[in-house]
Image (cartoon, rainbow, N blue to C red):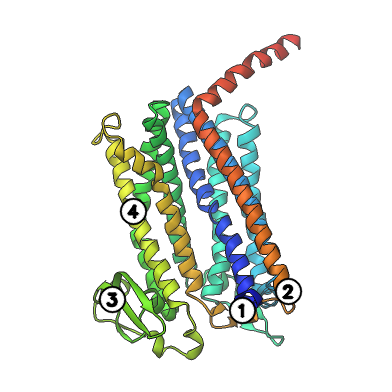
Amino acid sequence: MDLLTDAVFLDRLQFAGTAIYHYLFVPLSIGFGLILAILMTKAYKSGNEDDERLAQFWLKLFTGTFAVGVATGITMEFSFGTNWADYSRFVGDIFGAPLAAEALFAFFMESVFLGVLLFGRNKVGKTFYLVSGWLVWFGSCLSALWIIIANSWMQTPAGYEIGADGTAVLTDFFAAAFNPSTLQRYAHVLVAVMLCGALVAVAVGAYYLLKNRSEFAGKRLVRIGAIVSLVCVILMVPAGHQQAVEVAEMQPAKLAAMEGAYESGPMGMSLFGWVDEANQSLLTVEIPGATSFLASGSFDTVYPGLNDMPAEYQDLPVNAVYQCYHLMLLFFGIAAIVVILALLVSFGVLDPKKHKWPLRIMFIGWAAALLSIEFGWCTAELGRQPWIVYGELLTADGVSAVVDPVQLIITLVLFLVVYTFIYVVWARSFLKTVKAGPEAIGAAEQAAKPAEMDVEVQE
């Protein structure tokens, strides 16, 4: 019960809850954007009505997901001022630029060209309409870059100095923006979210093949989703490796927690296990020295254990970091298996009319990618504790000076209720659109044509 009166814990719980809900939609919207741009390109090149209907169908799925992603992210920005005022004062000079740039250069681009896609289909040229689709996706990727810049600075701060008032002062914008972890983390995140979006396309296509309907859409979505997800799985290998190298160099305490290592030495790679934090021991099945090899190219490279870290870096939720990291790897492995199945179905090795079990796995496979992303994000954020700005500002020192735990509990419950309602509404709308299928888009367009002709005759 002490946790219910701990303002720091409640602040963290509230922000974590809203962030997790928000981050359900960020990977989907960015991933959907790439699939949308590819489908629009297919329609542009082929001139096929089926391709055009499929692109418009996917635009409808993307738009609803994008809108919910925006809505669920707004409260996080307000919480910087209400719950994390001392943190905001410390990082204000640093965070102002990337957050403003995210709104001005990325979000506005995405929103403007999404408006073109929604309302300008018959009012602009076909080439400009296609370019608008790619710019929507590019804008979402650019938006992610600015957010990653801000978050990466918290992980590996650079390009600043501590001013006379004890706050961080920006001294080198480019050093701060492209701090030691920005590019590695951005590549890792971008590949992961595109994989998630591609597997949702696979899932929707598998649904149509399972139901023996919309065969064109089903095969097209499975083929595109399978190819995009294969590329993402391949790219994740170097992206994940570079991320691991950066963590080993810049955040050794996080690396030690990820493998439950209390003592220094060559670091093994656990397949699964449990960290006994009280006794500082790890019960595991591991490959000796494998993490050292992945990070440095040698099985014998020695990395410091948590007991050899400065005291202020040892206060980590070690088992939580360990479990989140290994769950991330587990679900990524499951997602990779789903990709293989999608490829086998797409290229006719497995006939979807004879083999239904791969389609059922493909239908739910996207959840593995999304869970891998969520657990990866939890690993990154829990792994830098007890720091909110690594090495500079403790999380406990970042909360607002006056915070009422009762108000925090009330707002936490309200947030969860409202966010759950939003999620349910989105899910029902999404599933309704999928069940209706691309043919519903075609039917709506045919129904609208007589009305348009009547207007022309009257004129």
> Do we see residue 204 in this rendering?
yes
Name the element at disc 2: loop
Q: Residue at x 55, y 79 (%)?
A: 387
CA–CA distance in space, label 2 to label 1: 14 Å
- Residue situated in front as seen by the camera: 222 or 435: 435
Residue underneath mark 4: 334
**The N terminus lies in which quarter of the figure?**
bottom right
- Residue situated in front as seen by the camera: 215 or 445: 215
Is 250 above or below relative to 446?
Answer: below
The numbered dot on residue 2 is 1
Residue underneath mark 3: 268
- Please identify, in this view, whether the residue under mark 2 or under mark 3 is nearer the observer: 2
Residue underneath mark 2: 404
Q: Which of the marked residues, 4 or 3, is nearer the chain's N terminus?
A: 3
CA–CA distance in space, label 1 to label 4: 39 Å
Q: Residue at x 54, y 53 (%)?
A: 26
Q: Callout 3, which amino acid?
A: Gly
Task: Please identify the quarter of the rendering in which residue 161 is found.
Answer: bottom right
Q: Are discs 3 and 1 less than 8 Å apart at CB?
A: no
Q: Which of the marked residues, 1 or 4, is nearer the chain's N terminus?
A: 1
Q: Residue at x 59, y 21 (%)?
A: 445
- Residue situated in front as seen by the camera: 145 or 334: 334
Q: Residues within 10 Å of mark 4 (few under 14, many from 20)?
A: some
Q: Which of the marked residues, 2 or 4, is nearer the chain's N terminus?
A: 4
Name the element at disc 3: loop
- Please identify, in this view, whether the residue under mark 2 or under mark 1 is nearer the observer: 1
Q: Position of residue 343 (x, y in %)?
A: 30, 41
Q: Callout 2, which amino acid?
A: Asp
Q: Are discs 2 and 1 less than 8 Å apart at CB?
A: no
Name the element at disc 4: helix
- Residue situated in front as seen by the camera: 415 or 135: 415
